[in-house]
Structures are given as structure tokens and as C-alpha cells.
Image (cartoon, rainbow, N blue to C red):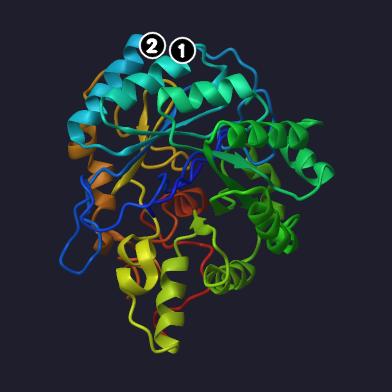
């Protein structure tokens, strides 16, 4: 489910975006407000991940939505979808990630894309790649899709297919990537990290470079949906820390945009490492990483379910309102949950006293899954702010 970094982090197969966005929008870009310290304002809508359908042709082991081939009742129809996009545009001009399930299973998906594009929204999509034919890729491009994300969770078909739950998923994803390339459509690779593939991440990075991806986004497993049943495959807090330090080193060595999603600790690590290297973290030195924060749920990002329920993110199953009953603008502005999330001083435990809480925030979904309290301390963090 990513994540704003100026990059697109949409994760399909029920694993929605963390912090997305195609291309690079720096400070001062239209629609993106910033405080004097360079950090984004606490309620500037920058990203919306919309689960256009829960139907899916795969059965991924980590799926937040436990998505299957359905059918699912109550999904927003075409006119309701248009109304949602109208209401989003009333709030701002965010990136809208069309996710799922598998968004290409909606017959009206290109009507929706064209409508959003006409409104001035930046439309991106998170398909699993298996349904992206040359004709579909051309349709994406012509309707205004600016980038797609395709998930690759292993560099061999056997590894990827086991994770995705369907034989042939890897071949299908690669065919989809080839079709996107032929259509001139940007694509990025998303990878969910578990103990099964953590040692393959360097190879996946090399693979992404070789096939022409513009970005690699890694996702740290959040144990929701079917992901609860593979919690034993989640990496430890120390492995998490080691992976994010490796990621920091690689960012200086690859032409790809690298983004860690559902991994808010990265923004602490970035500052710790930069300080150790005698560097100041600014937009000029560290790009968009310097002007965003870790957990954007309810602050610059939200998730809309297939039935119109607005949540802080796809992994944090809290009902903040329903767009079939209230306007999106009212929900975004007035939700009690959103407003609590927008003040980092509300955090409990060690997150509440951490000097990095405003740039990290901890994963609110992991806190909620572990304790039932979305403001509790992040359970998968080894940093102790009391020791500095």
C-alpha cells in the first residue's frame, strides 16, 4: 500500500501507495506548500491513493486487501468516480494513484483517467503488469497516465511467482513492462522486502537499472490483510535499520530515483548519516528527501477504498468518513483522526519524545496493528531517543 517524495510509490495488488508521484516536484511547485524550515505544511494534500476496485487477477501473499477475483459490491461507479475526482480537485491538485486490486479490471478506467487529467490532477497507476498489453499501454499514455508502477519481488520467475501467488506472474509483469516501454510510458519497480528476498535487493536494483526503470521503491512489510499470515517473514528492527542504511549508500551510486516506503525511519537515518558526514540536509544537497517526512498518512496523503471510505493510508484501517456520504474536502479538513495525525506531539511512547518525530513519524499502521493505538510508538524501530 505505499506512500510525498516527488516519486510515485503506488503498490498494486492491494498494497497501495505509501508516498507517490511521477516526476520530481520540488519546493515551491504548484500545490505544494512548505514551512520556512522546508518541511511540507501539515495538511497540504499531495497524494491520494484510490482503490478503484478490489478485484484482482493475482493472490499476493502480502496483500493488504486480501484481494481476489471478486466480485465486490458497493464499488464506486463511473459517475461516483467522477464526483470523487471533482471533490479531490476542490482541495488541491495532488497526484492520484489508481490502485487496487487490479485497476485495469475496471472497464471505465481510462474514462476515469481522462476525467482526472482534464481536472489537472496528476494521474498515475499501479497495475501488476500482467494485463498491460501494447494496446493497454497506449491507452494509458493517451488518457494521461504519467507513470505506472510494477511490483517485482524477486529476480527470478520462481521467486516472484511464489510471492504473487500465480504461476506466470513474472513473465506477465515483464511483458507489461515491455509494452510500457514501447508506448513511451515511464515505469518504476516496487519491491516489498521480507526475509525471503532481503538478500536479493542489490540484484533487484541492478535488474531495475538494466530494464530501464526510472525508479525503485522498496516497501517494508506492514502486517495487514494477508500480510498478517506471513508476519514470520517480516524483517527485524535491526535488519530494517541495515537495509535503510544500505539504501542511503546506494542513492549516491545509481541513476534511479530510490524511495523507501512504509519505512519512515529512513528520514532519521538520512539526517544521522548526513550529520556524520558533515553535510547539512537541504533540497540542494538531498533533493526531495530533505523536504518530505516519513509517514504521510493523514497529513499529505490519504487512501480511498473501493467503497469510498477515506483512511489515513491503505494499511491503517480507520474510517475517517465516506465520500458517498460526505464531501472529500470536509473529510480531509475536519476528520478528528487526520487532525490528530497532523500534530507529531500527539505521539506516545518513544515516538512522542523523539527528536526526529516530525521528519519520521513512525509507521502509524504498524503501531495500530501492534497495539490498537495509531498514536503509539512504532514497534519496528531500534532507535532509542533517550540515548541519542
Depth order, front residue of 319/151: 151
Q: Is residue 286 visible?
A: yes
Give the left or right position of residue 169, taking residue 269 as reference.
right
Where residue 263 appears, as percent x and y from the top left, is: 50, 59
Give the left or right position of residue 188, taking residue 320 as reference.
right
- Report the mark closest to the observer, 2 or 1: 1
Residue 355 figure quarter: bottom left
Residue occupying the point 51% across, 62% down: 379
Depth order, front residue of 201/136: 136
Residue occupying the point 57% across, 66% down: 254
Where residue 344 appears, as percent x and y from the top left, is: 27, 61
Give the left or right position of residue 334, taking residue 303 as reference.
left
State the residue position of label 2: 78
State the residue position of label 1: 108
Which image quadrant: the C terminus? bottom left
Give the left or right position of residue 112, taking residue 214 as reference.
left
Mark nearer the N terminus (2 vs 1): 2
Residue 65 figure quarter: top right
Residue occupying the point 44% across, 88% down: 276
Q: Residues within 10 Å of mark 1 (few under 14, many from 20)?
A: few
Where residue 256 appears, as percent x and y from the top left, is: 54, 58
Q: Residue furthest left?
A: 36
Depth order, front residue of 370/236: 236
Where residue 373 appears, as percent x and y from the top left, is: 40, 51
Q: Is residue 55 visible?
A: no
The reply to whether callout 2 and callout 1 are in contact (CB within 8 Å) is yes
Amino acid at each position: 500500500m505505499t506512500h510525498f517524495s516527488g516519486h510515485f510509490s503506488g503498490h498494486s495488488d492491494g498494497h497501495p501507495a505509501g508516498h507517490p508521484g511521477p516526476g520530481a516536484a520540488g519546493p515551491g511547485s504548484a500545490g505544494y506548500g512548505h514551512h520556512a524550515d522546508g518541511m511540507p505544511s501539515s495538511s497540504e494534500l499531495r497524494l491520494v491513493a484510490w482503490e478503484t476496485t478490489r478485484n484482482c487477477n493475482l493472490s499476493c501473499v502480502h496483500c493488504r486487501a486480501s484481494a481476489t477475483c471478486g466480485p465486490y459490491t458497493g464499488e464506486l461507479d463511473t459517475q461516483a468516480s467522477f464526483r470523487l475526482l471533482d471533490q479531490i480537485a476542490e482541495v488541491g491538485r495532488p497526484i492520484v494513484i489508481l490502485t487496487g486490486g487490479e485497476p485495469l479490471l475496471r472497464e471505465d478506467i481510462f474514462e476515469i483517467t481522462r476525467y482526472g487529467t482534464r481536472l489537472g490532477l496528476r494521474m498515475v497507476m499501479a497495475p501488476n503488469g500482467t494485463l498491460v498489453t501494447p494496446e493497454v499501454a497506449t491507452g494509458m499514455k493517451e488518457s494521461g497516465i504519467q507513470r505506472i508502477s510494477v511490483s517485482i519481488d524477486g529476480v527470478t520467475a520462481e521467486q516472484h511467482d511464489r510471492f504473487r501467488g500465480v504461476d506466470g506472474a513474472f513473465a506477465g509483469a515483464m511483458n507489461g513492462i515491455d509494452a510500457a516501454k514501447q508506448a513511451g510510458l515511464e515505469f518504476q519497480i516496487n519491491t516489498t522486502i521480507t526475509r525471503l528476498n532481503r538478500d536479493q535487493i542489490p540484484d533487484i536494483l541492478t535488474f531495475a537499472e538494466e530494464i530501464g526503470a526510472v525508479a525503485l521503491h522498496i516497501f517494508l512489510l506492514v502486517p495487514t490483510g494477508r500480510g498478517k499470515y506471513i508476519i514470520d517473514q517480516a524483517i527485524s528492527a535491526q535488519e530494517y535499520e541495515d537495509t535503510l542504511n544500505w539504501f542511503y549508500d546506494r542513492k549516491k551510486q545509481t541513476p534511479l530515483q530510490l524511495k523507501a516506503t512504509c519505512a519512515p525511519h529512513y528520514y532519521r537515518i538520512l539526517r544521522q548519516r548526513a550529520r556524520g558526514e558533515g553535510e547539512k540536509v537541504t533540497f540542494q544537497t538531498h533533493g526531495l528527501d530533505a523536504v518530505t517526512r516519513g509517514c504521510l498518512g493523514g497529513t499529505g496523503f490519504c487512501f480511498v477504498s473501493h467503497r469510498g471510505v477515506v483512511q489515513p493510508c491503505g494499511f491503517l484501517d480507520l474510517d475517517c468518513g465516506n465520500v458517498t456520504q460526505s464531501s472529500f474536502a470536509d473529510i480531509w479538513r475536519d476528520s478528528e483522526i487526520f487532525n490528530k495525525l497532523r500534530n507529531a506531539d500527539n505521539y506516545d511512547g518513544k515516538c512522542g519524545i523523539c527528536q526526529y518525530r516530525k521528519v519520521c513519524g513512525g509507521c502509524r499502521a504498524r503501531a495500530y496493528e501492534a497495539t490498537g493505538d495509531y498514536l503509539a510508538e512504532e514497534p519496528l524501530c531500534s532507535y532509542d531517543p533517550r540515548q541519542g
